[in-house]
Image (cartoon, helix red, strand yellow):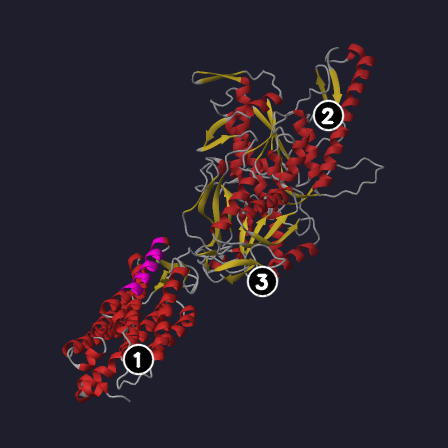
Amino acid sequence: MEISAIVIGLVLFLSLCELNSALEVSAGLTEEKTGAGVSTGASSMKCKLQGTTRLPVFSMDGDYTIGGVFSIHTYKHTVMHNYITLPEPQKCTGRIDSRQLRFSHAMVFAIEEINNSTELLPGIKLGYQIHDSCGSVPLSVHVTFQLSNSLDPVIYTGDNCSHSRKVMAIVGESSSTRSISMSRIIGSFNIPQVSHFATCACLSDKQQFPSFFRTIPSDQFQADALAKLIKHFGWTWIGAVRSDSDYGNNGMAKFLDAAQKEGICVEYSESLHRTHPSSRIQRVAEVIRRSTAVVIVAFAASTEMRLLLEELSLQPFPRRQWIGSESWVTDPKLLSFSFCVGAIGFGIEQAVIPGLREFLLDLSPSKVAASPLLTEFWEDAFSCRLGESAVIDERLCNGTEDIQTLNNPYTDTSQLRITNMVYKAVYAIAHAIHNAVCQDTNSTAQCDKFTRIESKQVLTKLKKVNFSRNGYDVSFDANGDPVARYELVNWQKSESGSIEMVTVGHYDASLPEGREFRINRNLTWLEGSTQVPVSVCSDSCPPGTRKVLQKGKPICCYDCIPCPEGEISNTTDSLDCFPCPKEFWPNAERDTCFLKSVEFLSFDEVLGIILAAISVGGACLAVITAAVFFRYRTSPIVRANNSELSFLLLFSLTLCFLCSLTFIGAPSDWSCMLRHTAFGITFVLCISCVLGKTIVVLMAFRATLPGSNVMKWFGPLQQRMTVVFFTFIQLLICAIWLGLSPPFPMKNMSIYKETIILECALGSAFGFWVVLGYIGLLAVFCFVLAVLARKLPDNFNEAKLITFSMLIFCAVWITFIPAYVSSPGKFTVAVEIFAILASSFGLILCIFAPKCYIILFKPEKNTKKHLMNKN
């Protein structure tokens, strides 16, 4: 429809161009034939308008004329052209739109108010020509051409027909589509157009519409405001309905762009128009009924919304939260649809125009009878006929009808929104004319009503107007748009049960980012609830999960997937999970990172307490044994087993028991170096003593052989030197280890993901295994010597005891290696402590327990005679 309308406009425009050319030629021929016979003189030209003149519905002569175009009727009578006879003048049909009638009277009121003013255009009378476009693009184009010329069929101009008596400016239209058609025509003639209700953002393009202005904000601002409103309430899944017109299509396109930036998804987007067949309206209604989106954004004109709501009311359907554009959400005629309670949208700010209501109600019978339009309005409002026009079964108006008793949009001035836009448009044009023809000196203005001005001058001055009227500022930016200010309107149910529009907030696009929108009253939602409805495709993903889009669906439809191990998300609707820092681990819900639990073998836990107790007990046992030996140091069994090496061995065993305590507790730099070196040195000292005792046994046996003098080579000094030598080698190995790459404390986070193991790193694994290998080498050497001496013929052969002790020692440390390597965490330390304690107990029990038994419980065997007996 919009395309055809534009085509019609262009055709008419080209026709007018051809008509003007024809008129110029015709006028020239007429002048050439008549010469100076023209009554206005030889310099004048007579121009005759072609076509049928359409009379305005309201008009008044003045020094300067302002045009007005309003859709007072809703439909145009369709005429089938036969292209044989001249078409009849187009007629309007349908009911009168009382709201549009109020707009037209508001223009008349503003002009009369200006004519009575002593400050604005003093001494100058403004005239007006107000036309009814019947909501039709062709008629809008027709009256636009007519306003560009004159009502007179024949006019006289100075030199050519281009200087017809056109209007200074035009107020209108009430539709974006019709305003576009009008602006494309009058823009070529530099006639300014100020619309009160055309909101399409496309009209801000000064390349296409250089003479277009408006007092109502562009839909670009409304689209942004609606997107922010929806985002404010957390709605991400909506339906979209629009008028299939420039207003609806462009407005919805701007809204969808803004909504996409806010992360809002659209389940469906449907369009409808009042000229569409009923099946199309039914299909849109069915889409709404089947949808899952609770919130519906309707960027539609009130006419299309009425058709849609009437269709929806025929069948029950799930209640929906309506979000409306200004065009319909502030229309009082739609408040009758009770299922729309809770609707919310942006409306133009309310205003108070003093004296307007009295002017609207000042309709005397003579005024009504003088105007066919007012007569039609009167008869329709009171359901009677004026004069002799009544037919059978129709009531004649008897004169008792009182317009003040009417309850319709014409008389309703409780919420003047668009009416104030008309009022401001007239005043803006008046200020532009004032600035063109008047000279302001001090506090007075001098105006010359005989000054001839062109509409182009008014256009230039209109760009610069800046004034206040009734507390509202009026100015235009470079695109001809005003400052965007809206009221947030909510349909609420009153105490009487009726629905009324309540202002609950404001939106001011001139304020800084983030402060434009505010709500200052409680809102009512669908079905009168005070709880904000929920409209989402998928519920929000809680912390600990991430969003995964559902294949083939919009971004608002997703699944919530738990974060993988070791990762968290701590926000709602997180797109990704992120890993915790190195020393942290997620909680069970995977929404917070906590410090990992630190694990080490401590003195506070049962295992640590048991091992510490055994270690201390072993040390006490070694001390007790040494005390027994010291008490009976003169007894044969103590003297026979090399008491000096025995005491040194008991001392080293005490150190072996105690060194296991260094493995318990939190590792530190000193404890890590001490535990391994102390363990290595004390065990070498211990094995060296055992080795010395074994050699003494062997040497003593050899010394008893005839001619043997071997004991002089292995006396007490040599025994001490042997122990010192073997121990010094271990000291040297440990010193090199500590000097090059000593053990150090470390946090092992590779064994358990959720636990930090505090342990001592070896520093140099080679150094550790050299220390351990040296101990093993001495133990094996001692074991071999003990095996060789185990069958000596003494009654009490210490070599047997040493053999068993070395057998246990070697078995413990052979099994220690795989257990040490495979044990996790703190159990590695426990295995090492166990090996130390087991081998230490093996030595003390195998070597010293039998001797203590004899000393304490079998003293009769603790004699030299008994010890010297041969087996």
Disc 1 to disc 3, C-alpha distance: 103 Å
Q: Earlier in the sequence, mark 1 or mark 2?
A: 2
Tag of residue 317: 3
Choose between 288 and 428: the one closer to the eye: 288
Tell me if residue 85 comes above or below residue 46 in the rendering.
below
- Label 2 element class: loop
* Range of residues picked out in magenta: 724-739
Label 2 sits on residue: 153
Residue 481: x %, y % from top left: 55, 33
Label 1 sits on residue: 799
Where residue 60 sits, quadrant-wise, is top right
Residue 35: x %, y % from top left: 80, 11
Marks 1/3 in contact by CB < 8 Å: the verdict is no
- Does the magenta portion include 333? no
Task: Identify the amino acid type marked 2.
Answer: Pro
Disc 3 to disc 2, C-alpha distance: 58 Å
Label 3: few (<14), some (14–19) or many (≥20) C-alpha neighbours in 10 Å: some
Choose between 655 and 360: the one closer to the eye: 655
Tell me if residue 262 comes above or below residue 38 in the rendering.
below
- Image quadrant for the N terminus? top right
Disc 1 to disc 2, C-alpha distance: 146 Å
Choose between 45 and 315: the one closer to the eye: 315
